[in-house]
Amino acid sequence: MQTQRKTETHAMPAPAHSSEPEARIAPPPFPIAPSGEATAIPSPAHALQERLETAFAEPVIENRWSPRQTLALLVFTCGAFWGAVIGGAIQLFG
């Protein structure tokens, strides 16, 4: 509570208004609707999201392996690898 009071009492003063003309102020990086209109402006971010969604959509794969076939391949390849490692170690050290 005290730190909040300190920051409030020691707050920096607001910057003084500059005498620069309005034309020198940079426009915002995004389009703004006129004050009297409430129309929606198309967002480039939303368009990009939609394009990425369609580009990275998962394709339908018709010939997928069943979980049983995948497990059999995994067991076979890992078994062959460890069999070769153990057989090589027996030949080398045995």
Image (cartoon, rainbow, N blue to C red):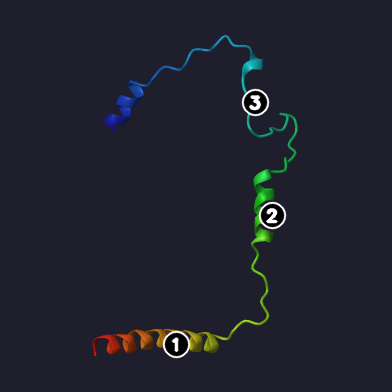
* Camera-nearest label, 1 or 3: 1
Q: Quadrant of residue 40?
A: top right
Is label 1 in a helix, a strand or a loop?
Answer: helix
**Image coordinates for residue 14, horizontal then vertical, percent:** 45, 17
* Camera-nearest label, 2 or 1: 1
* Camera-nearest label, 3 or 2: 2
Identity, as a three-letter code, of the amino acid under mark 1:
Val
Q: Quadrant of the C terminus?
A: bottom left
**Image coordinates for residue 11, horizontal then vertical, percent:** 37, 21
Identity, as a three-letter code, of the amino acid under mark 3:
Pro
Q: Does label 1 or label 3 sit earlier along the sequence?
A: 3
> How far is mark 2 from mark 1, CA to CA?
40 Å
Q: Among all residues in the image, which is located at the extreme left?
A: 94
Q: Are marks 2 and 1 in contact (CB under 8 Å)?
A: no
Q: Are marks 1 and 3 in contact (CB under 8 Å)?
A: no
At 73% from the left and 29% from the top, the residue drawn is 34
Which residue is nearer to you in this view: 89 or 54? 89
Residue 27's tag is: 3
Report which residue position mark 1 lands on: 75
Report which residue position mark 2 lands on: 51
Q: Does label 2 or label 1 sit earlier along the sequence?
A: 2
